[in-house]
Amino acid sequence: MPPSPTPVAIVGGTGYGGAELIRLLVPHPAVRVVRVTSIDHVGQPLEAVHRNLPPTGLRFEDVPPAAAAAEADVVFLALPHKVSATVVPDLLDAGCRIIDLSGDFRLRDAAAYERFYGQPHPHPELLGTFVYGLCELNRDRIAEATRVASPGCFATTIALGLLPFAHRGALRGPVHTVAATGSSGSGAYPKPATHHPIRAQNLKIYKPLAHQHTPEIEQAVADAARRGGHEPAFSLQFVPVSAPLPRGILANSLFEVDPAVDADTIAQWVASYYEGSRFVRVLGGGAVQAEVVAVKGSMYAELSWTVGAVDPVSGKRQVVVTTALDNLVKGGAGQAVQSMNLMLGRPEHEGIDAPALWP
């Protein structure tokens, strides 16, 4: 007989991240959603709030996270930053696996957390006890983990473009990244600066050189460099852009490499690094470039690059790496389910390998 489905709970199910978790987990063949908690819409059926869902037999419950965990082997935390950190200690005694979608346990450095999240971490002793849930960087560690900090959407997009170069020790000096994101990344509840009727007619930067995903990206890329046998020697200058689309991120990272590094070398580096990574589509350095519409609604990330001439001033060759993904799926809930699959010993792609929407 096949094994019984693993019971899972979702803490914080009414936001966009929670909605995507429900959408992916309800039909997942290896799990059974047993509880979904929220402080909003309490008592309402899931499908009454997330109208894309079929009837599930579940309702939103306002119960403590530890009570939800009592029935679950895996607990997903789809809570805001600064809230997850207050919940996790109560879950540690429950014996469940924890997958946190917030930024509260991604960083290992408490000082960096305080600088970029605006307050001291309430439980700094737990920093470093979560495995960073970027499967393309930490696949083996995630498979053995009981606590995973799922990456941010910008961080996933940008890091995927830089990991192969860091692994080869090719990142030396500044990396300049401009990345545009859709309005769903701002959450389900509109605010004056993020409400889509305004955003749909606008382009603007926000948090330039100060976005909270900056240290997360630097940490992940530095880890890739060290695993390749190189000491990290780069910095990230990141400018986010608020874009007039509901879903998706497009990131362009510009940096310089040794002039001896040519297009064929870069193609070999990227192909080698992502060999066996099912959800990263390597498009190459040709005319077909990464774009949002090709990955919308899916787990797939696209990666392309442009190799420039040697700059006469610096003497280095210029490279632009372009990456695109859906911020709610590969950049959010889908990536958390990808980690869950590994933690449960299931095929990494199980339940999350549907193609993108087109157009």
Image (tube, helix red, strand yellow):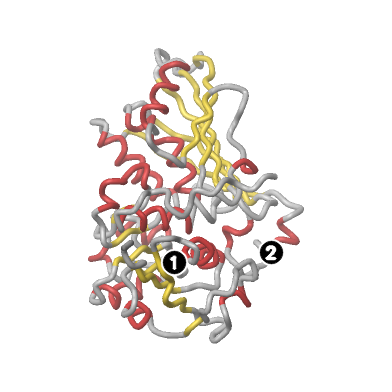
Q: Secondary structure at mark 2?
A: loop
Q: Is residue 216 above or below residue 304?
A: below
Q: Nearer the viewer, residue 193 or 53?
A: 53
x and y, in percent, of residue 13 in the image = 50, 72
Q: Is residue 94 above or below residue 140?
A: below
Residue 3 shown left or right of residue 243 in the figure: left
Disc 1: CA contacts within 10 A as few (<14), some (14-19) or many (>=20): some
Residue 166 is drawn in which quadrant? top left
Residue 66 is drawn in which quadrant? bottom left
Q: Amino acid at mark 1?
A: His
x and y, in percent, of residue 308 in the image = 54, 19
Q: Alpha-carbon distance for marks 1 and 2?
A: 20 Å
- Tell me the number on the disc at residue 81: 1
- Tell me the number on the disc at residue 124: none
x and y, in percent, of residue 346 in the image = 34, 53
Residue 44 is drawn in which quadrant? bottom right
Q: Secondary structure at mark 1?
A: loop
Kindly tell me whether residue 144 is visible in this rendering.
yes
Residue depicted at 47% across the width and 17% down the height: 263
Assess whether mark 2 and mark 1 are in contact (beta carbons under 8 angstroms): no
Q: Nearer the viewer, residue 64 or 189?
A: 64
x and y, in percent, of residue 156 in the image = 45, 47
- Residue that badge 2 annotates: 195
Q: Earlier in the sequence, mark 1 or mark 2?
A: 1
Q: Is residue 252 above or below residue 336?
A: above
Q: Amino acid at mark 2?
A: His
